[in-house]
Amino acid sequence: MTEVTRPQGVVNLADGEWHRLHPASPLLRGGLVFIAVLGFIIANLRERVIDIFLTIFAPESSGPIDAEYGEWQEDWANDPVGGIVMNGLVGWALLALGAIIVAVVIGFWLSWRMHTFRVTHEAVEVRSGILFRSHRSARLDRIQGINVNRPLFARLFGTAKLEISVAGQSANVQLAYLGSTLADALRADVLRLASGARAERAHGAVAPAGAGDGRADASATVAPGAATPPGGLAGPDTAGAAAAGAATQSGAEAAGRSPVTARAGALVTQRVDEFLAPELDPDLAPPESVVHLPLGRVIGSTLLGGSTIWAIILVAVIVIGVTSGQMWVLFSFVPAAIGLVSYTWSRITKSLRYSIAGTPDGVRIGHGLLSTGNQTIPPGRVHAVEATQWVFWRPFGWWSVRINVAGQSVSSSGDAAQRTIVLPVGTAADVHRVLALLLPDAATEVEALVDAGLVGRGDAGGFSATPKRAAWLRPFSWKRIGLAETAGVAVIRRGALIRSLSLVPLARMQSVALSVGPIERGLDLATLRLHTVTGPVSAVVPVADRAVATALFERLAREAIERAASDTSHHWGAASAPASPAAAAVAPEAPAAPVEPSTDASAAPVEPSTGPSAARTDETEPRHVG
């Protein structure tokens, strides 16, 4: 594993102790809704509030105001503010408003106080809730990826949301919000633990640079001489600016400024640096492994996407409806057009500053301009990969790459669906790079099949040939349909209007199915389907010669058993981690092997492994982090 210099004076969040989130977390999670509602009320009552203030401070204007609102003065439903003023209840109203604000502040404080988390060698646990308590535990061996999102408003506070994706529906664990530096470091520590590696560190002490695996624990640098709460954890006022603490202190002494002024200046400088910093740390990956998207390609691919057809249809319907006097069209189709424009704009902005690169802990994907995010996909978590080309992209040679990862489905929310797209738009050379990152164990062997899989036909490149009689079922795409297998990866090519190249690592294939319908039986054809976890990628050979499909079925089922039994990619760091007395050895679990295939049905289900759960429930006092 790549050695990274460990910072001095760190805050370790992966020490097995309970910790709290950033103090601004309640405001960032729910306080924004409260502020938005308050702003909505003020915006709608601003004219009435101005009139009331004029009545109080300029009594001579009360005549016109009373004439205007005379019929509403006793109507509390239409004018509650006027009713309060006319009945002399202003004092009580202000007292009630103050009580509500105090209750909200207390609620936010209790929410922050009762929301704790800890990271052990087996799981990430989160406790939350005031009246109704909940305790969630995400096992490290079930982690499919870690996402660090920085919404625009959260970036102003120097915070980030860390989300741990776990296999299973609605099983993800969120830590919203942590200090930005703490979130990045905690991600590195969780990935280190999930990899099967154990860092060599002494109890209650910070390991020197280069010790263990050389990685910094989930921590933030604390300025020398700065006050630190008990337990060695940064307080709420120091966590946000922890990384710039040492520079702040030395700069203040050199310039002769007060500590408060120096800290404020350093905080502003740090926020500006965070906004300008690349989402992907260039120190983690060589520059040649990074794929960047030009702005023109992002805009052009979006405008030439499938949404363009719908946009043309909506505009045509609206124009025809308005010109023919059918005004109901405005109420029916204009909202749809607004939603389509919003979707297009969102797709463009989320593709800005997009980058993907390989790191020691997997593939790191970053995106976003104002609200940013990055996703880390550990090795052995990708169940299927698909490169697709929309017909309008063909003249430019553009492709898009998606993946299947456990815990995410094709019907997930917008943010979750976005995480399945690892390359929004790229050239064939970009596809080669991305596939080499996603399938590193078979990169060399797969490389020889990619070009033939993207644009080839027939048996070119070692793909199986589809008989001409398949044109009765697939008249336009039968020449492109084919399957090849190399280095434990099944490669499927298909599609005419939308070209598709699917790759499935056999070690993570769930089952394989061979089906023959009545028409296919008459043509001596069959359909071969490779089952993976739910996601946008569907690995299907729509039509193939029945004898060839049967042979492929038996070979894939047999090899899937062998590959699953020998696969240890889910503990990618175990082999490179140094052994030490303090390190706990982690034995790699081999996924369960598929069962023997049948002649025409699915086979090879990979059973989820079971293991010990980190269900410690001790109520030690949590430490709070910024």
Image (cartoon, grey):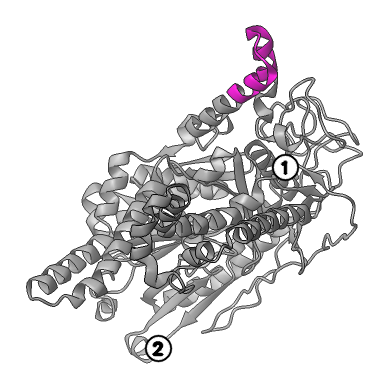
Tell me where residue 197 sits by quadrant: top right
Residue beneath the point at 24% across and 66% down = 310
Pointer 1 local density, CA inside 10 Å: few below 14, some 14–19, many at least 20: many
Screen quadrant of the N terminus: top right
Front-most of residues 612 and 20? 20
Which span of residues is magenta-colored? 247-265
Pointer 2 local density, CA inside 10 Å: few below 14, some 14–19, many at least 20: few
Front-most of residues 561 and 350? 350
Screen quadrant of the C terminus: top right
Q: Which mark is residue 418?
A: none
Residue, far left: 324
Can the viewer see residue 440 in this picture? yes
Q: Which mark is residue 189?
A: 1
Q: Position of residue 288 (x, y in %)?
A: 46, 32
Can the viewer see residue 490 in this picture? no
Q: Is residue 34 magenta?
A: no
Front-most of residues 129 and 382? 129
Earlier-in-chain disc, 1 versus 2: 1
Q: Position of residue 206 (x, y in %)?
A: 83, 30
Q: Between tags 1 and 2, which lies in front?
A: 1
Q: Which mark is residue 517?
A: 2
Label 2 amino acid? Gly
Q: Position of residue 386 (x, y in %)?
A: 43, 59
Residue beneath the point at 65% across and 49% down = 25
Q: CA distance from mark 1 to mark 2?
A: 51 Å
